[in-house]
Image (cartoon, rainbow, N blue to C red):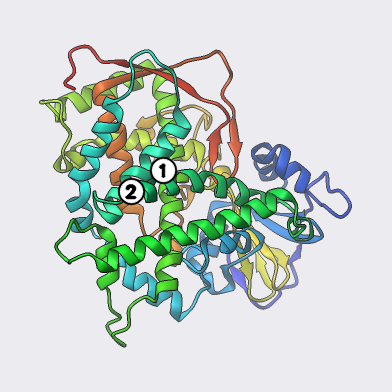
Amino acid sequence: MSTTNTLADPSIPAPVAPGRLPLIGHSVQLARRPLEFMNELRERGTVVRIQLGPAPAYVVTDPELTRTILVTEPKSFIKGGQIIEALRVFFGDGLATIAEGDLHRRNRRLMQPMFNRAHIAARGDAMIDLVERHTNAWAEGEPRAIHSEMNDLTLAAFLVALFGTDLPTQLEDGFTKLLPEIMRGTIRQTVLPGWLAAIPLPAQRAYRSNLVRLRELVDETIRRERAKPDDENPGLFRTLLQARDTETGESLSHEQLRDEVITLLTGSVETTGTTLAWALYEIARNLEVEAKLHEEIDRVCQDGHLRIHHMSELVYTRSLLQETMRCYGPAWLVTRRTTDEVVLGGYRIPRDVDVVYSPYILQHDPAVYPEPDRFDPDRWAPGATPEIPRSSFLAFGDGARKCIGESFAWTELMIILAVIASRWRLSIASEHAVKPVAHVTVHPDKLDMTPRRRAGRHQ
């Protein structure tokens, strides 16, 4: 199946999803039951039309057609759409939202060295030490709101990696307080029709005020980093400050640095923290999974202390996290914008409309993942068959817009999970049936977990 800019006779309009309402289209279903609604679209076809308010959007449910959008013919499907425009208000023109073209390629080229394996490894032990300090402070038997806990922990670890260990407390606390509030406001912008999102309600005014404060915090942090001596507790951000375009000699402007920092901070909190919360939930529900994880960590970290050179040996730990991302996201809805009238999978799609793909749909396809609702890390074991197609796992995207921080995300995820599992067992603290909620990520609605020390493990 392919895309072409010349309409062929066999092309037909895409089927329309049921339940469309006047003026608001399918927005109510997307707001009330987004995952169920999106998953049901697979039965309607490989391309299905929905309405976001009065505007049409085309949902792609087929992995090969999704690969066409992201890899084979990306010039026909550029970064854009209602969701991206809402995120741009928050991120500015960071890599996640900036339009295709020379500027995107240049900024990505400047940022790439920041995420090479050597730089990440150099920050690894500092991240491990921070996670050990945070989790050692847990009180045994005291339930914790684990999603919030993991968001705070991933942000703290990322700040250490990005800015070093000497970031002032008021800046760290400011980021910790503001980012969750802003993310809640951002998701409101993505699901509401544009005319409704523009009404200056109290929640909207608070959202704008929080955005202003976040930018002030980032500006202060950048100025502080510029003033530090080169050898004073450097983090990954120092690499970005020193990056120069090989052709022009130019560096990122202050505004570009600000937008990239906001983009990076958001990615470090919502996606990574949510993945860890779900991983801990699934470990608590699956005793065999927990036993395999503990066996691997105890064998690799024989003295009870994780170090960065252990990462390559934690094969089952990585498989467990990959299965968590398959089951729960991180992103559940991603948009592109057509640059021309196209045919995709035999369906006609107009110019300048949203095309939507959902990693959640693709990663729950029973044709690729037998028993897709079953949590099974062994799907990802080395040599497992059948091999899962690359286009059916899109936790980090694909093509030229693939997440630039993938290597860092894997390192951070594995560090935090391994440190926790080396010392603690967590159990689900209530009988509440945990439900997935689709915001920017698919996160648990309420997840309290009780930590208990593993017998004989080193503190």
How far across and how far down the image is residue 161, in percent?
Answer: 27, 51
Which quarter of the figure is the N terminus placed in?
A: bottom right
- Give the residue at x 45% y 72%: 255
Q: 131 or 1: nearer the eye? A: 131
Instruction: Specify the amino acid type for callout 2.
Output: Phe
Which mark is first along the chain, 1 or 2?
2
Circle 1 SS class = helix
How far across and how far down the image is residue 221, in percent?
Answer: 36, 60
Instruction: Name the front one of labels 2 and 1.
Output: 2
In which quarter of the view is residue 152 placed? top left
How far across and how far down the image is residue 410, in percent?
Answer: 32, 46
Residue at mark 2: 158
- Give the residue at x 38% y 77%: 106
Residue 160 in view of the camera: yes
- Give the residue at x 39% y 68%: 257
Circle 2 SS class = helix
Q: How far is disc 2 from disc 1 in space, using C-alphas? A: 10 Å
Residue lying furthest left: 303
Q: 229 or 391: nearer the eye? A: 229
